[in-house]
Image: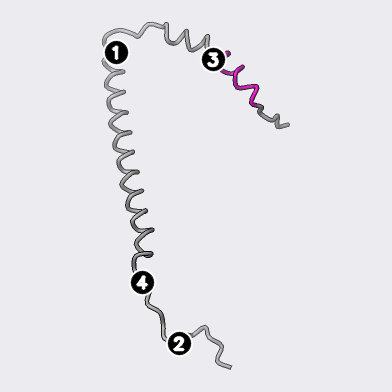
């Protein structure tokens, strides 16, 4: 059975998330070695995401240009009366 989600459930979820969030934020940050490792992981993840975002932006710009290009070029039309293999000759 699927239970519909209602807008009034959102505040309840936020209130229920507060105690675990406070517990995580109050927890020890670890030894200096653990902090160094976490810092390196964070730095690598941020570099990866920067590269991904740059790639997505480049692809988006290229797709946009390709999409606009046909509108800038006039499409040559075939002369009237040209027959094609798909035309009915009868």
Tell which tag, 3 or 1, sits nearer the viewer. 3
> Which circle's residue, 2 or 1, is located before the other in the chain?
1
Closer to the N terminus: mark 3 or mark 2? 3
The residue sitting at 35% across, 58% down in the picture is 66
Q: Residue at x 34, y 65 (%)?
A: 72
In percent of the image, x 33 and y 38: which residue is there?
53
Instruction: Give the x, y percent position of residue 27.
Output: 41, 6
Magenta segment's dominant SS is: helix
Of marks 3 and 4, the one in the foreground: 4
Q: Residues within 10 Å of mark 4 (few under 14, many from 20)?
A: few
Q: Quadrant of residue 79?
A: bottom left
Q: Position of residue 38 (x, y in %)?
A: 31, 18
Badge 4 element: loop
54 on left or right of 81:
left
**Residue 80, located in which quarter of the rendered image?**
bottom left
What range is drawn magenta here? 7-17
Q: Residues within 10 Å of mark 3 (few under 14, many from 20)?
A: few
Nearest to viewer (mark 3 / mark 2): 2
Q: CA distance from mark 3 to mark 4?
A: 59 Å
Q: Which residue is mark 4?
A: 74
Identify the residue position indicated by label 3 in the image: 17
Which mark is in front, 2 or 1?
2
Q: Above or below — where is 47 with respect to 77?
A: above
Which residue has dot 1 on it? 35
Tell me, for residue 55, which label it has, or none. Answer: none
Q: Which mark is residue 80?
A: 2
x and y percentages locating residue 13 in the rendered image: 59, 18
In the picture, measured across the screen, residue 63 lies left or right of residue 9, that is left
């Amino acid at each position: 059975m699927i239970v519909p989600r209602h807008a009034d459930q959102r505040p309840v979820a936020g209130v229920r998330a507060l105690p675990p969030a406070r517990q995580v934020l109050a927890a020890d940050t670890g030894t200096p070695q653990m902090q160094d490792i976490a810092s390196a992981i964070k730095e690598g993840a941020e570099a990866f995401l920067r590269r991904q975002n740059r790639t997505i932006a480049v692809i988006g710009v290229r797709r946009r240009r390709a999409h606009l290009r046909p509108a800038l070029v006039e499409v040559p039309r075939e002369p009237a009366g040209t027959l094609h293999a798909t035309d009915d000759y009868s």
